[in-house]
Image: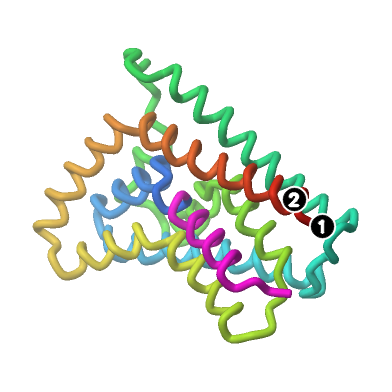
Amino acid sequence: EWQDGDVILDLVLIGVVITLEPLPLTAFILILLAKGGVRKGALFIFGWILSLAIVIAITILVTGNKPPQPNTSPSLAVLAVKIAIGVGLLVIAERQRRRLGRPKKPKKTPKWQTGLDNMSPWFVIGLAPLLQPWGLVAAGVATIVEAKLTSVASYLAVIIFCLISTSAFLTMETYAIFRPEAAQTFLGRLRTWINDHTDVVIVIASLLLGFWLIGKSIYSIASS
């Protein structure tokens, strides 16, 4: 049975962490700052939401929109996946924590960044799913697997997950449309801030979501 409050909370938390991922954010900022950035930004958002929607739709079709019964192997497997994702996030957090304060090694600029002004629409759309943090998306999918989409509230929860996962892009895109000159300055400053605080953001977000997924999954196993 769909437990609206729990599932919505899980999806909101996962969605927030997805939208705050530094790598996709930096890529989107660069796209907006490029020639024809607003149009390309809209195409990136389309590809981002489309890839999320396809994965969710496939999940629902494969599972038959039937959540596994409690205390069965499938239900325990879903919880085990969420625990594994949580552990993976803690490992990432620890790895990034060790980098704090260390001088960053210069990285070679990816080829796609050097051709932003001439990037084709199809390339922009295809770039979005490549930058998706699929480990986090998997946590959202695992949450959806535990639910059954039967009510308006349940479908809205999935839509809200997709929108929250895209909210940072939507906000920047809207700002760039209505305040193009101010957006250029703001996005440049935001890019600098992200570059300077990437490790801190990853550590905090990974720790919070990792402990949440592990703790809640273990509680579900213990109380079932």
According to the image, label 2 marks what residue? 79
Query: Can the viewer see residue 109 in this picture?
Result: yes
The answer to whether residue 197 is above or below residue 152 is above
221 lies left or right of 41:
right
Residue 88 on the magenta segment: no
Three-letter residue code for mark 1: Ser
Q: Residue at x 76, y 45 (%)?
A: 80
The answer to whether residue 52 is above or below residue 211 is below
Three-letter residue code for mark 2: Leu
Query: Can the viewer see residue 112 in this picture?
Result: no
Percent coordinates x, y for residue 203 in the rendering: 44, 32
According to the image, label 1 marks what residue? 75
57 lies left or right of 15:
right
- 1 and 2 marks in contact (CB < 8 Å): yes
105 lies left or right of 211:
left
* Number of disc labels: 2
Q: Residue furthest left?
A: 181
| Start-end of magenta stretch | 1-17
Percent coordinates x, y for residue 223 in the rendering: 76, 54
Main SS of the magenta part reads helix
Percent coordinates x, y for residue 151 in the rendering: 64, 85
The answer to whether residue 181 is above or below residue 193 is below
Q: Residue at x 37, y 62 (%)?
A: 167
Percent coordinates x, y for residue 84 in the rendering: 70, 39
